Amino acid sequence: MPPYAGPSTAARSGEVADTLRLMAYLALALTLIVLDHRGGWLNQARKQTATLVAPLWAVAGWPGRLIERVSDDAGTMSQLTEENRKLRNDALVNQARMARLQSIAADNLRLRGLLEAAERGNLDVVLAPILDIDLDPTRQRLVLDAGSRDKVRVGQSVIDAGGLLGQITGITPLHASVLLITDPSHAVPVVVARNGVRLVAYGEGRSDSLNLRSVPLSSDVRVGDMLVTSGLGGRFPPGFPVGTIAALKPDDSRAFLVGEVKPAAQLDRGREVLVLLSIPPPPADTTQFRTPSPAVPEAQAG
């Protein structure tokens, strides 16, 4: 076995080199510390380095900021969408409430007009709600929520704030049927309010029109004349407006005139009517119902 000869020369040379390098680093570090303490150049170098690196930091932060902004925008859009939906729902609810209030106001105005018409003519009437309406061209009828228990009888006249609607033709204890003046089988004896010329207005199955037939050419009848019930025949009390003459023209024979009359009553509107319980005395002024009350709006019956 060879004797131990100790570390080799190469190993000792490496250790010496490492020691020298360490001493050099320590000396350099001490030198830098002393120089930085006296002149502060290392701090300035750090500031300049930070200035140079700042754009790199900004570029490196773009993805994070972009993701954060997209997330914020998505949250804002979702919030705005929800708020918009709630506002639309609130608007619809408010519109429904407004429509309901307008309907109630219209009902109140219409009822006020009916009551004013009854009071104006000192009429003995009962207020009857409309249950059903039939405006078929061959059948013009109303069904009222009032019957014999409410003193309603067959033959009684039915009016609204504008004028004559029709006549009671059938009753039960709870309900009554009304034949409208526009029914094709109906005819109303009328007079021209302006001069008392007697005529007959016929229904023709239209809620907005009556018909005058065989009007003598010599009659003093004009477009715009108001027609009121004459009371002849005892079917209707005298003095109630029936309609206004809207047009006149010669018939096929050229011997007579035929006329179109716009009804005074709102035959296709309203929810209540007045039933005359007793025949009122002839009015001193036949124009008491000449024009519908301005307080009555045009609301569809229902």
Image (spheres, helix red, strand yellow):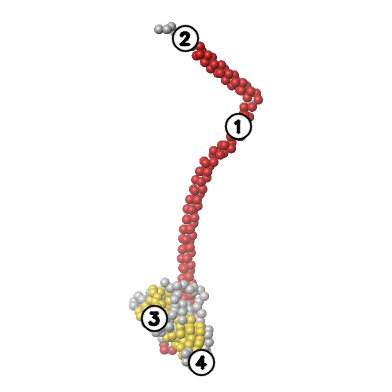
Mark carried by residue 217: 4
Residue 61 place in picture, x, y as percent: 54, 39
Query: Which residue has dot 1 on it?
Result: 49
Residue at image coords 48%, 68%: 105
Q: Quadrant of residue 58?
A: top right
Query: Which residue has dot 2 on it?
Result: 6
Q: Establish if 97 lies above or below 71.
A: below
Identify the element where label 2 is drawn: loop
Asked whether disc 4 touches disc 1, contact meaning CB atoms under 8 Å apart, the reply is: no
Give, as a three-letter code, the residue at label 3. Thr
Compare marks 1 and 2 and give the one earlier in the sequence.
2
- For marks 4 and 2, give the CA distance: 157 Å
Give, as a three-letter code, the residue at label 2. Gly
Residue 13 place in picture, x, y as percent: 53, 14
- Disc 1: CA contacts within 10 A as few (<14), some (14-19) or many (>=20): few
Compare marks 4 and 3 and give the one earlier in the sequence.
3
User: Mark 3 or mark 1: which is in front?
Assistant: 1
